[in-house]
Image (tube, rainbow, N blue to C red):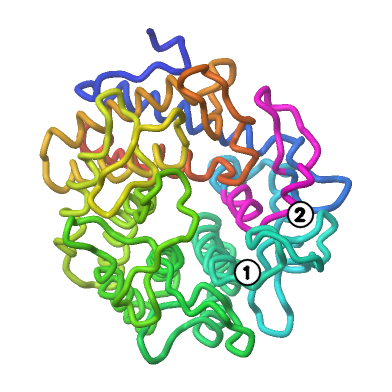
Amino acid sequence: MTFDDLRFVPDVADPDMLLKVLDRATENSLRFWTRPEVTDSEFGGLHFWFDSDGNRIPFPPEQRGKSVINLLRVMMLHGLWLAEHPEDTRVSAQLERGFRFLEEHHRDPATGCYYNWLELDGSLIREKGPRWFTSQLDSISTIYVMYIAAELAGTLGDVRYLKVAEDAFMALEKYAWDSEFGGYYNTMIPDERKDFAKSAGQNMHMALALSRLIRVSDRPEYREKAARLVGLLERTMNEYDLAYNDMDREWKTPVFSENPRFYGSAKVLAGHDAEVVWYLEDAAEAAGIPYPAWLERLGRKLTELIEDDGLFVLWCDEKGGYVRHDGVIWWSQFEVMIMLARLYKRTRDAKYWERFNRVMRFTFEKLMNPGNGVFYCNAQLSTGKVSAQGGLAWKGGWHVVRALIESRKVAAFFAGGIEKERK
């Protein structure tokens, strides 16, 4: 395979070529997610649903409507495009549409918290249904608003996004923070709370969001809270050097799902664990505390879960055991790429760079549309059947582009110095 094939991945011994490949893949994804087709002229805001060829398709009825996380991820890609193309008035207008929909429909004016899913027209979903497709004020929604708003504030220098991020932090402190045991509840609004669990997903994303907020508004309370979360999340580690996905209120006992996703005894969401390794590296740095040694232990354990061909497991049991399944899911593949690149830069252990190369090659081969360089959400390995393009926007291309940019920083470092890194 040569550079002419969009799926081409060079050997990591050639970092200059790797930079070219990462830049090309980034450009292709940004172009895809900022096309005119992203404008939702029917219902307002942005459109997220595209088939495997990139054509717009109706919103699937089983998804009920629009997710705030989808919206934020696509908005972030618009911000990255505008950072390089500030004269692009069309993309700027699309980003404004997204921002207006976010503030006019997803934000609850009474609390300042954000609704997860809404009907297509922006109204609340009144019927009961699966948790992820109802209009609940889940903490992850407001955390993600804080995260992406802080990113956009830094990327574009727009003070409106900084205010949104800081207001979201205040809402989370008021409605989701557990003042007794620490950490953020999965649910908002104390008077209505029935779920007292602490998800690693919510709290590690909050740690990452704080690291981004500190970059644009360095305040002591942000640093203190980031340091607190790094310490709390260490309690999710088990004796096998993996991290449980859900903990009880006191951060003592793991909470196991009654319906494990893929494997009968699944207790660890390995894709989240890979995120923990690099999220908390950033959070610790932002908080001004030493790098937590346990992150490297977790990274080493996760590296053992990468198959020889480059497939990374999504779920596993508490010991790291799993049964290889007949599918590859994009977000876990890209998150472990970031983890491996970061660990290589930190340790200079060649095994991490070799595994990075293996995972990247497998991911590009199995998940990239060779016609336009945009990634599918997942693929069935036995048949080669792929999902809709861009993962129906549930991951909105942001996992892809973020991983490409973060990997590029490491490749640039080894290609010739820090001055080549993309800021």
In the rendered structure, which amino acid carries the disc numbered 1? Arg
Q: Amino acid at mark 2?
A: Arg
Q: Residues within 10 Å of mark 1 (few under 14, many from 20)?
A: few
Residue tagged 1: 160
Residue 167's quadrant in the figure? bottom right
| Left or right, residue 374 beside residue 364 | right
Seen from the viewer's position, the closer of residues 57 and 407 is 57
Quadrant in which the N terminus is drawn? top left
Judge the density around disc 2: few (<14), some (14-19), many (≥20) Cα neighbours within 10 Å.
Answer: some
**76 vs 235, nearest the viewer:** 235
Of 21 and 264, which appears nearest the observer? Answer: 264
**Label pair 2/1, CB-CB below 8 angstroms:** no
Give the distance between the C-alpha atoms of the residues marked 2 and 1, in whole angstroms: 14 Å
**Residue receiving disc 2:** 97
Image coordinates of residue 41 in percent, x first then y, are 86, 45
Instruction: Decide whether residue 59 is among the magenta residues.
Output: yes
Residue at (21, 58) in percent of width and height: 295
The image shows residue 324, relative to residue 179, as above or below, that is: above
Going 55% across and 72% down the picture, which residue do you hit?
139
Q: Is residue 148 left or right of residue 324?
A: right
Q: Earlier in the sequence, mark 2 or mark 1?
A: 2
Membership of 66 in magenta stretch = yes
Question: Residue 368: percent from the left, percent from the top?
Answer: 50, 24
Label 1, secondary structure: give it.
Answer: helix
Which residues are the magenta region? Answer: 48-76
Query: At which x and y percent is residue 117?
Result: 70, 60
Residue found at x 26% / y 43%: 321
Where residue 389 sits, quadrant-wise, is top right
